[in-house]
């Protein structure tokens, strides 16, 4: 089954969000939509999934889904979207309740989805008892339960810490590796997009993606080095101020001009380093000294 974006455009009032977007997601392909926050990625995904009617163009499914597919399209959301009063197993079973499957068949599907996502030991646990990464695994298991032809993922890792993102990214790659399911992956993270796309790309595309990822990594390293250097400089400045103490200290001497004796340079420690250059006062003739 193919998913086709056919000249999709969309507006929210006077704001144009999408303008004539066309592409095709073929059976077994992984397509990543990359862009900064607010550029319309999630809007496009909602249109592709039938949750939002576009202002122009259309989203089209072409071809037949797999014979055992209960829903050709399904979402994995950024915010998990779990039912808090249901256990893990009940959340995974929820989209199966109104299908033709009987209770025994539903249990078998749920058990298979839990096994594939590493949740078999947590079937009776409630969402509030799970970490963010585990909750997202429940969302993935729920999506897999309907055996979709195309999986629509809306920044599914953005709310997670870096270690959990890495683990779930490996899960996504493993689940999509056999080519039995296509996916549209929305993200603002270029590295995530590259890792998923590299699993399916041809050699020329792989090289281009690797170059883009290398540039992104170098830019990130440069920014980190600059931030570390700035932090070290600030720490040294604060340490120097602390060493001066709270009282006024003689910091050095400097000649004000050739006609007058040297002036004392005084420093007082405040929130900022303050240096006062004090020029001697020359008394007027006849003044008391």
Image (tube, helix red, strand yellow):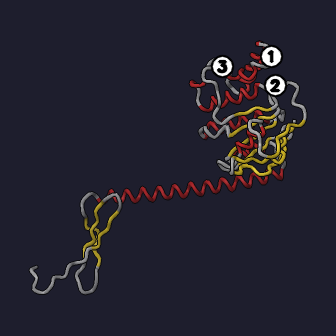
Residue at 68% x, 29% y is 139
State which mark lies toward you, 3 or 1. Answer: 1
Instruction: Measure how far apart labels 3 and 1 are at the Cα level.
Output: 20 Å
Nearest to the observer: residue 44 or residue 235 = 44
Asked if 88 appears above or below 163 in the picture, the reply is above
Q: In x, y percent, where is residue 246?
A: 26, 57
Q: Quickly name the residue at label 2.
A: 70
Q: Are marks 2 and 3 in contact (CB under 8 Å)?
A: no
The disc placed on residue 123 is: 3
Q: Which mark is residue 267?
A: none
Q: In this orientation, does residue 190 appear? A: no
Q: CA distance from mark 2 to mark 1?
A: 10 Å
Q: Which residue is mark 1?
A: 101
Q: Badge 1: few (under 14), some or many (20 or more) residues near its Cα, within 10 Å? A: few
Question: In the image shown, does 89 or 219 lie closer to the viewer?
Answer: 89
Toward which corner of the image does residue 43 lie, by quadrant?
top right
- Coordinates of residue 7 in the picture (x, y in percent): 83, 48
Q: Is any atom of residue 50 visible in this view?
A: yes
Distance from disc 2 to disc 3, alpha carbons, whole Å, reads 22 Å
Quadrant in the picture for the C terminus: bottom left
For the point 10% across and 82% down, which residue is it?
287
The 10 Å Cα crowd at callout 2, few under 14, some 14 to 19, many 20 or more, is some
């Amino acid at each position: 089954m193919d998913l086709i974006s056919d000249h999709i455009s969309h507006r929210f009032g006077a704001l144009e969000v999408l303008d004539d977007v066309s592409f095709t997601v073929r059976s077994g392909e992984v397509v990543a939509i990359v862009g900064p926050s607010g550029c319309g990625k999630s809007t496009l995904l909602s249109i592709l999934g039938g949750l939002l009617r576009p202002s122009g163009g259309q989203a089209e499914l072409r071809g037949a889904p797999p014979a055992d597919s209960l829903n050709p399209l399904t979402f994995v959301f950024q915010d998990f979207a779990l039912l808090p009063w249901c256990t893990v197993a009940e959340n995974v079973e929820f989209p199966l309740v109104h299908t033709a499957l009987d209770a025994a068949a539903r249990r078998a599907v749920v058990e298979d989805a839990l096994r594939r996502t590493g949740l078999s030991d947590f079937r009776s646990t409630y969402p509030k008892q799970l970490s963010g990464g585990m909750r997202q695994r429940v969302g993935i298991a729920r999506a897999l339960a309907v055996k979709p032809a195309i999986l629509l993922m809306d920044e599914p890792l953005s709310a997670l810490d870096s270690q959990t993102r890495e683990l779930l990214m490996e899960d996504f790659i493993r689940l999509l590796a056999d080519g039995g399911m296509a996916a549209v992956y929305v993200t603002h993270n270029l590295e995530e997009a590259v890792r998923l796309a590299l699993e399916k790309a041809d050699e020329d595309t792989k090289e281009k993606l690797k170059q883009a990822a290398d540039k992104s990594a170098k830019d990130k390293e440069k920014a980190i080095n600059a931030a570390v250097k700035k932090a070290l400089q600030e720490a040294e400045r604060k340490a120097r101020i602390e060493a001066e103490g709270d009282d006024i200290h003689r910091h050095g001497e400097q000649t004000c001009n050739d006609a007058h004796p040297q002036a004392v340079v005084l420093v007082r420690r405040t929130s900022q380093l303050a240096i006062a250059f004090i020029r001697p006062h020359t008394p007027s003739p006849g003044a008391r000294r």
